[in-house]
Image: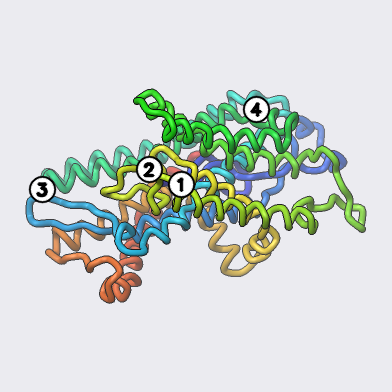
Amino acid sequence: MAVLDAPAPHAPSAPPPLATARTTAPASAPTSAPDAARPRRARDPFVDVVRALGTLGVVLLHWLMAEATWDGRTLLVGNALGHGAGWLVTWLQPLALLFFAAGASAGYQRSVTTVGGRGWGGTIAARLRGVVRPVAAFAGAWALAVAALLAVGVPDDAVWRMARMAPQLLWFLGVWVVLMALTPLLRAAWQRWRWGALAVAVALPLALDALRFGLPGEVTGALAWANVLLAWAAPFLAGIAYASERTAPRRPALDGTGAPADPLAGRTARLLLAAGALAAVAATVVLVAAGPYPLSLVGMPGDEISNLGPPTAPVIAHAVAQVCLVLLFRAALVRRAASGTGARAVGALARRSMTVYLWHLTAMFAVVGVALLGLGQELPAAWGADWWASRPVWFAAYLLVLLGLVRVFGRFEDRRR
């Protein structure tokens, strides 16, 4: 699994934490001559909230998975969610929210580059330059850590096992880069075909998944890996559609005061979103119950099939449900994050979302490694009474280490601005 975006109010940001969502100001807003070519933008708090929910969901889900044993020579890594009813927790995996937020950010940015006359290639290059610094710091720190751990005598098997697992989070960046490059085409598809474009975006990965399991042969199996891109293109396009309708709706409607009406606040829109979420959840349940798919919506040790590698039909239906639900509860989410603790939490994640994403597994590895290899302790058996009772302690330790890592490496995320 993995994460996406958020920066400070004065600058655009990069991915897994990926780019600040901003809406363009009304055309009638006064502008000075030097700023005429650079539209004013205001943050869309909904995109920040969705990204924060996705980031927290990824962190908590990964921290719940911690399961490992050490016999003095071999490190065996399992997954606590692979036991009993733990698979139910995997249905909370929030990758669709992260891709939706990334798509919305890209949609807002595309509207600004279109109005301002700047090239999209330059926008992507700037985003990539911003991502390189925190990723390079992450890779460099891990290289030094591996060398240091081996030098002080930490068993090779344990060191290399952790070193192979930590960079797995970076798969998201490759998908994000491709989707960012395709943003002008995706936005044009939405503006021309509207709901037809979204229907095709959902149908393509479903068709590919049907071919994967309906036809024999290695070709269809290899082709199915295209769903690593196609499956996440659907929520990404939904985010672009959301941003496009916020900045340049096809048929602007006015409320009773003459201000632009919120198209998601109407009774019809809410009923459609609720119906879409229910239908998508029902489809996910039916597919898992009747198809060749495992119960878990993430990869589990021992399963012949991973629902995420590559994404399968249940994951695609689950993504549709998540997007419908966050849009359905958009007003409530924004209201909760408008002030107080919610606003502070969303703001903090907006400033450090990429650092949190990159380092949350490292924080878990450090705590578990010290407990197993340094103190000789055993992790409690998953889902037992000791496991439940110890969750607050383990999570507090993970969080304490993560906060230290964020304090040290967050400066590289600052520099991307």
Q: In terms of image quadrants, where is residue 166? A: top left
**Residue marked by disc 2:** 169
Label 1 sits on a secondary structure element that is loop
* Horizontal side, residue 377 vs residue 163: left or right: left
Relative to the observer, which residue lies in front, 227 or 348? Answer: 227
* Above-or-below relation of 32 to 367: above
Q: Residues within 10 Å of mark 3 (few under 14, many from 20)?
A: some
Relative to the observer, which residue lies in front, 373 or 288? Answer: 288
The residue shown at (35%, 40%) is 137
Q: Earlier in the sequence, mark 4 or mark 2?
A: 2
Q: Earlier in the sequence, mark 4 or mark 3?
A: 3
**Residue marked by disc 3:** 155
Report how many numbered discs are placed on residues in the image.
Answer: 4
The answer to whether the residues at label 1 and label 4 have Cβ atoms under 8 Å apart is no
Give the mark toward the camera: 1 or 3. Answer: 1
Question: What residue type is disc 1 on?
Answer: Val
Looking at the picture, how far across and down is residue 220, in whole percent? Answer: 41, 27
Looking at the picture, how far across and down is residue 248, in whole percent? Answer: 78, 38
Question: What residue type is disc 2 on?
Answer: Leu
**Residue marked by disc 1:** 3
C-alpha gap between disc 4 and disc 3: 49 Å
**Residue marked by disc 4:** 184
Relative to the observer, which residue lies in front, 315 or 156? Answer: 315
C-alpha gap between disc 1 and disc 2: 8 Å
Q: Earlier in the sequence, mark 1 or mark 2?
A: 1
Question: What residue type is disc 3 on?
Answer: Pro
The answer to whether the residues at label 1 and label 2 have Cβ atoms under 8 Å apart is yes
Q: Residues within 10 Å of mark 1 (few under 14, many from 20)?
A: many
